[in-house]
Image: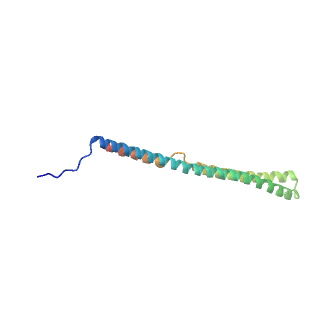
Amino acid sequence: MTTPSQPEQPSLGQLVGEIGEDLSQLFRQEVELAKAEIRQEAAKAGKAAGLLGGAGFAGYMVALLVTLAVMFGLGSLMHLGWAALIVAAVWAVIGAVLFVTGRARLRQVSPKPEQTIDTLKEDARWARDLKK
């Protein structure tokens, strides 16, 4: 009479090897997640910087051309120096608004990969619970 063979239990070495492979795969996935988050934040920072640069250039061109037009228009009503000063004050206000808006958007950029940090903390809790 033959006895049915029982399924072979993995050895301790095999289990440790599997855990090592799983941890290695988990680490690679976490690194990829961190890279993706950093790329995403860098893209947001690039867009904010582009907006600030574009606002600066557009503001310069508009200020130059409109200043001349308005200055000469006001120059027919008052002294040209006063007209230039009024126009410059208006563009100073516009520049300040553009600067504050761009700075606010730049502050929204987070250099830390928050999602990766959260999952690493979760992984650490999981590993501690596994040891118990």
The residue nearer to you, when weighing 89 against 102, is: 102
Q: Residue furthest top?
A: 13
Q: The C terminus appears in which quarter of the rendering? A: top left
Residue 130 placement: quadrant: top left
- Residue plotted at (60% across, 49% down): 45
Indicate the position of residue 42 as horizontal and vertical percent values. 57, 48
Q: Residue furthest front?
A: 1
- Residue plotted at (84% across, 54% down): 83
Indicate the position of residue 41 as horizontal and vertical percent values. 55, 49
- Please, which colouring scheme is shown? rainbow
The residue nearer to you, when weighing 27 against 112, is: 27
Query: On the picture, is 117 further left or further right than 107?
Result: left
Query: On the picture, is 53 further left or further right than 123?
Result: right
Query: On the picture, is 39 further left or further right than 14?
Result: right
Query: On the picture, is 121 further left or further right than 74?
Result: left
Res. 131 in view: no
- Residue plotted at (33% across, 42% down): 17
Indicate the position of residue 108 as horizontal and vertical percent values. 57, 50
Res. 105 in view: yes
The number of numbered discs placed on residues in the rendered structure image is: 0
Indicate the position of residue 51 as horizontal and vertical percent values. 66, 53
